Structure formats: C-alpha cells, structure tokens
C-alpha cells in the first residue's frame, strides 16, 4: 500500500532529476563551446587565408568558425544554435555594448591585436515534463523551455 503511494512521487522525482541533469549538461556544453569558439576566432586574427582552424576543417572565416562551433555542440540537435561572433574594442566591452556591435565580416577583417572577440549563443532547452517546465522555464516563456545563453570573450592575437 505504501509503495503504491510513494512510487509515483519517486518516479516524478527521478524524472525531474534526469531533466535537470540534461539542462545542466547542455548549459555547460554551450558555455564551453562558446569559450572555445571565442578562442579560435581570436587565434585566427588577421592571418585569415593562411591560418587553418584547429581541426584543419578549413580556413579562418566567420562561416567556418560558426560551423566549427556548432559542430562541437554534440548533445544539442544540429541547427538549434546559431552563434553570433562580434569584434569589439575594450571600451565597448566595458560599457556592455559589444553584443550590439556589428557582426564580423566574412573573414574576421576587424580582428586586430588588442581587440576583443565575443561569441554569443543561446539554445531553447526543452524541459520535457510539464511539472518541471512550470518550475524551470524562462520567464515569459509559454512553450515549456528554458533559454540557455552563453557569452565568451577572447583577445585577438594578431
């Protein structure tokens, strides 16, 4: 009798823990990939047509760096995340307006020594269970998802 009362609650708790673990895992992955993408974009710098990406998948262009970033998001469905790559001055970073800066030209032409490369990404993580989505969904969201966002910065190398 006691098992019949406790089992549904235990199952709901187990499912909630699994969903929360998926959310945390994907958040960590989005954050790490954004950081890695910013580092790659900063290393590419202005030696674009001769510099290769770390995995030798192509030259250092904005499109190739974006592809590099999304290819390293293993647990997230393909096409769900589109990274925005910006090059900013230090004053834009300090004032918080870097993400409003123009996105990179097709070949990172504005990445010069001392400038900052910023990679911004977001992913609408589905929460799968209605009870969990009521607790964890993003404010204002009605589709039962949590918006996972990540932003990373690196200083241009060249």
Image: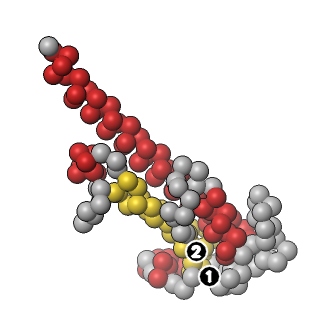
> Which is more N-terminal, label 1 or label 2?
2
Nearest the viewer among 78 and 16 is: 78
In-image side of 41 versus 49 (left or right) = left
| Residue 129: mark in rendering | none
Q: Which residue is mark 2?
A: 85
* Callout 2 touching callout 1 (CB < 8 Å): yes
Nearest the viewer among 11 and 95 is: 11
Q: Position of residue 32 (x, y in %)?
A: 56, 54
Q: Position of residue 67 (x, y in %)?
A: 65, 66
Q: How many neighbours does mark 1 have within 10 angstroms: few (below 14), some (14-19), or many (20 or more)?
A: some
Distance from the alpha carbon under mark 2 to that under mark 1: 6 Å
Nearest the viewer among 29 and 114 is: 29
Task: Give residue 69's quadrant in the image.
Answer: bottom right
Task: Give residue 157's quadrant in the image.
Answer: bottom right
Q: Position of residue 126 (x, y in %)?
A: 38, 53
In-image side of 36 versus 130 (left or right) = right
Q: Position of residue 23 (x, y in %)?
A: 41, 48
| Residue 104: mark in rendering | 1
């Amino acid at each position: 009798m006691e098992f019949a009362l406790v089992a549904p609650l235990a199952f709901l708790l187990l499912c909630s823990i699994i969903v929360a673990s998926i959310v945390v895992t994907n958040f960590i992955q989005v954050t790490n990939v954004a950081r890695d993408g910013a580092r790659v974009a900063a290393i590419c710098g202005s030696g674009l047509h001769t510099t290769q990406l770390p995995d030798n998948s192509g030259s250092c262009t904005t499109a190739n760096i974006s592809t590099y970033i999304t290819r390293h998001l293993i647990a997230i469905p393909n096409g769900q995340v589109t990274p925005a790559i910006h090059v900013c001055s230090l004053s834009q970073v300090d004032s918080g307006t870097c993400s409003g800066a123009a996105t990179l030209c097709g070949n990172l032409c504005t990445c010069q020594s001392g400038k900052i490369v910023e990679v911004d990404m977001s992913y609408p993580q589905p929460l799968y269970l209605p009870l969990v989505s009521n607790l964890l969904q993003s404010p204002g969201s009605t589709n039962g998802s949590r918006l996972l966002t990540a932003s990373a910065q690196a200083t241009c190398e060249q």
